[in-house]
Amino acid sequence: MNPAIDLDRLRADMLELARIGMAAGRPGINRPSFSDADMAGRRFFMERCRHAGLDTTMDCVGNVLARWPVGSGPVVMAGSHLDTVPDGGVFDGTLGTCAALEAVRAMRAAGVTPKHPIEVVATADEEGRFGGMLGSQGLAGMVDPGWLEAATDSDGIRLVHVMRAQGLEPDRYAEAARDPATLHAFLELHIEQGPVLESAGLAIGIATGVSGVFNWTVTLTGVANHSGTTPMDLRRDAFAGLAAFAGRIPAIIAELTSDQARLTIGKVELAPNFPHTIPGSATFSIIGRDIDDGIMHRMAKLCRRELEAAARDHGLALEIREESRLAPVDLAPDVATLLAEQSRHLGYATTTLPSGAGHDAQTMQHVTRAGLIFVPSKGGISHAPEEDTDWRDVERGANVLLHGLIALAA
Ligand SMILES: [Zn+2]
């Protein structure tokens, strides 16, 4: 019997998880990391894994690990995350987690016995509620204890407090780390969260790497003053400086000559923020991304240059604070090639592409060979209740994961 995903079984698990994240009066799925709903989703998933005959545990940072104890040697891991953004969709994370379990069930149903053990993983805290990816960073031994201790969400709630309230043990984070010698590979299936596959009419994308990202908070400080009495040429208008910089973004991108370069000002605060007053200060975010570390460094340099010019031209003081920086990650080329071959062999229209969004696979790449499979997102939409993927694409993606697992574990 040719191993194949049972879409009805996979869909049933995903829709059951979606139900766990739904609340009255909210449009989307809400399982923010370490919330009651998140933990209920994890317990449901553990139950499904046990039902499939897997040895299932939750580690000290909340990762669900479900092992199929066959074969010997290092394990092939597959999975994704179960937490969601506020009012997220049905597919983000949940797809890759449930598909990994379904792949194991499909292998067993088809009588496939892998040479390597297989471990299904539902990682914790991937969506950045506390600014990191605690679950996969825990597995990869990449938790910064200072960050763990200090991390808070946007409401100021401490990570270690919510973890302890859920019976988890943040102080023992080091025990979650996996010895790289025990890992053979890691595979993740995820929705693309962008428009590339859909607009090209492709079913499957294999990620070659994940963009790096820097996160800056910039403050331009001038002088708040009366909007009527202050002549235009005597102003030190913080918003004018911000606008001048924003107007230079296309030129910065053009100078970088990278089609993966992204610069975004997503958050702006003016003070006093009153219609009749010239803004005395502008505090704003700059998020820079690219797939190449050298280009990211050049991008940062160009941003500094343009910010300094804007500050000078408008008589403003400039302060730049780097909140965080993640370098780009190249995913394992041999795994990407293997996945693309499996996908084409299954008859799916397939391409390779970089990932502009962060994923657990980029963390796992630090300790093993990681592969990342994308399926199309309708309209490129994600992190929203409208997030949608055709169930036929879900089935295709899960079959690529299944056959990738068989090829790697055989
Ligand atoms: Zn995700």
Image (spheres, grey):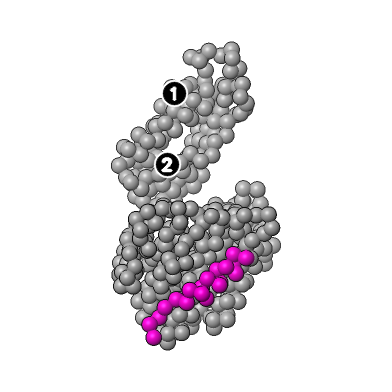
Q: Position of residue 152 (x, y in %)?
A: 62, 51
Q: Nearer the viewer, residue 200 or 251?
A: 200
Q: Nearer the viewer, residue 231 or 26?
A: 26
Relative height, residue 133 to residue 286 (above, below): below
Relative height, residue 36 to residue 242 (above, below): below
Assess disc 1: are there few (<14), some (14-19) or many (≥20) residues with their C-alpha within 10 Å of its C-alpha. Answer: few
- Nearer to us of marks 1 and 2 is 2
Span highlighted in magenta in the image: 1-19
Horizontal relation, residue 343 to residue 225: left or right: left
Residue at left offset 69%, top offset 58%: 24
Residue occupied by mark 1: 312
- Rounded to the nearest angstrom, the CA distance separating label 1 from label 2 is 22 Å
Horizontal relation, residue 264 to residue 130: left or right: left
- Do we see residue 364 in this rendering? no
Dot 1 beta carbon under 8 Å from ligand 1? no
| Magenta segment, prevailing SS (helix, strand or loop) | helix
Relative height, residue 2 to residue 366 (above, below): below
Q: Earlier in the sequence, mark 1 or mark 2?
A: 2
Q: Position of residue 88 (x, y in %)?
A: 56, 56
Q: Nearer the viewer, residue 194 or 135?
A: 194
Element at badge 1? helix
Element at badge 2? strand
- Do we see residue 377 in this rendering? yes
